[in-house]
Amino acid sequence: MTEAGSEVTLADVQAAQRAISGQVATTPCVHSRTLSRITGADVFLKLENLQFTSSFKERGALNRLLALSPAERAAGVIAMSAGNHAQGVAYHAARLGVPATIVMPKGTPFVKVENTRVLGATVVLEGEDVEAAAQHARALAAAHGYTFVHPYDDPAVIAGQGTIAIEMLAAVPDLEVLVVPIGGGGLIGGIATAAKALRPTVRVVGVEAALVPSMKQVLGGLPVAVSGTTIAEGIAVKNVGQLTRAIVARLVDDIMLVGEGDIERAVMLLLEIEKTVSEGAGATSLAALLAAPEEFRGRKVGLVVSGGNIDPRLLSSVILRGLARDGRLARLRLVVPDQPGNLARAAAIIGAAGANILEVYHERAFTALPIRATDLLFVIETRNAQHVAEVVAGLRSSGFAVTVDRAGNGGAEHGDVTP
């Protein structure tokens, strides 16, 4: 294995593959006929969300742990992470009998903290963000002699992640494009190193959330500016690696930025079409195809679905918003005289049109309507956007004034009846 600070090579990645073989899953690289039809590309999915801890992070963590000296193993390791790296280190350290401490920011969701503890690590909650947690982890490493296992800026970690490319090209040797999420750069750094050595003509495209475009900004000589909270929190890394940025600059052909809507849609499509759960970061590769299909049309494309650790409540919101965007959920707003019978009459029309009423609200207090009028809101389940239009037409033909609240904008202008 190369020393810290030196270049990572194909030989390092191949050595990592031999080292971790049989200890991590060789995840499937599956062809998706439906996503191929939707995007116009020939799409293959590398399902790293099927690792035991549901993330590719196991590969690099294990490779780094296997490189420890006997003295380092005895002293133990420490890592900083708010999620996937924490679980990867915790799981394989416990397997290998290596004491592990994980420093997580104070605001880390309880489920991630508990999952890390269950896997055998000692969890320390310290710092308001990942950077503060990293500083505390390094201080503990210096004080107790722990080996710090970096989540991405370490040659052994980078090499471990690169084993994904070896597996993808073994499964589909003629892949033309690899699309890979970028956080700190360890995943794409390892994949680009192996892929370009094995198949020099392959195009490697990185993907970042548009709200956290750290690698693109750094390589463009711009200050890093984070503009919001992304669903792809697994790649929301402000400080990209020193080793990884050099690899990305040398080997990665392009970096694409994707919006939150495309990421949400990608999570939804992976769930509905492939029956696989992806976290936001893991779905960014598909989001890139959805955002710019013309860039990939007609080409054989491999997408890395890097992880599946999404909070169930967040996934629920993604599903509901996706159904609304597709017209399978709709919220209708009717202004009606506040008189007996109007609710029943409107409900009967909706039912006769074949829609299912999920929720009903009367709004009397928080409205500027005349005192004898009321806002009547229906949340309905429909087949598609055309079905919503049919329901609206039926209500309007019966004298109801209807607006449709569009998904994602908090409401519709009065009189807007187009779903």
Image (tube, grey):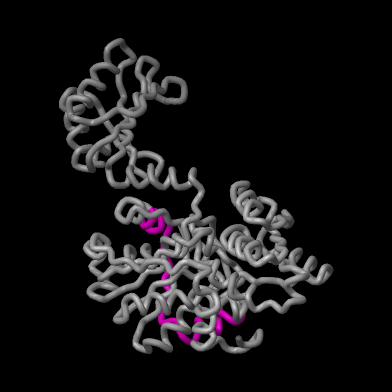
| Magenta span | 242-267
Q: Is residue 370 left or right of residue 386?
A: right
**Front position in the image: 222 or 249:** 249
Residue 283 image point, x, y percent: 41, 61
Q: Is residue 72 left or right of residue 199?
A: right
At 39% from the left edge and 67% from the top edge, which residue is drawn?
A: 46
Picture layout, residue 142 above or below residue 418 = below
**Front position in the image: 23 or 140:** 23
253 in magenta: yes
At 19% from the left edge and 42% from the top edge, which residue is drawn?
A: 386
Residue 171 image point, x, y percent: 34, 75
Residue 62 picture quarter: bottom right
Image quadrant holding the C terminus, namely top left
Q: Is residue 150 left or right of residue 13?
A: right
Image quadrant holding the N terminus, namely bottom right
Q: Is residue 102 visible?
A: yes
At 50% from the left edge and 74% from the top edge, which residue is drawn?
A: 21
| Residue at the right extreme of this rendering | 143
At 32% from the left edge and 51% from the top edge, which residue is drawn?
A: 272
369 in magenta: no
**Number of residue marks:** 0
Q: Is residue 217 visible?
A: no
Residue 56 image point, x, y percent: 50, 66
Residue 96 image point, x, y percent: 65, 67
**Front position in the image: 223 or 218:** 218
Name the main secondary structure of what is drawn in magenta.
helix
**Front position in the image: 234 or 93:** 93
Residue 101 picture quarter: bottom right
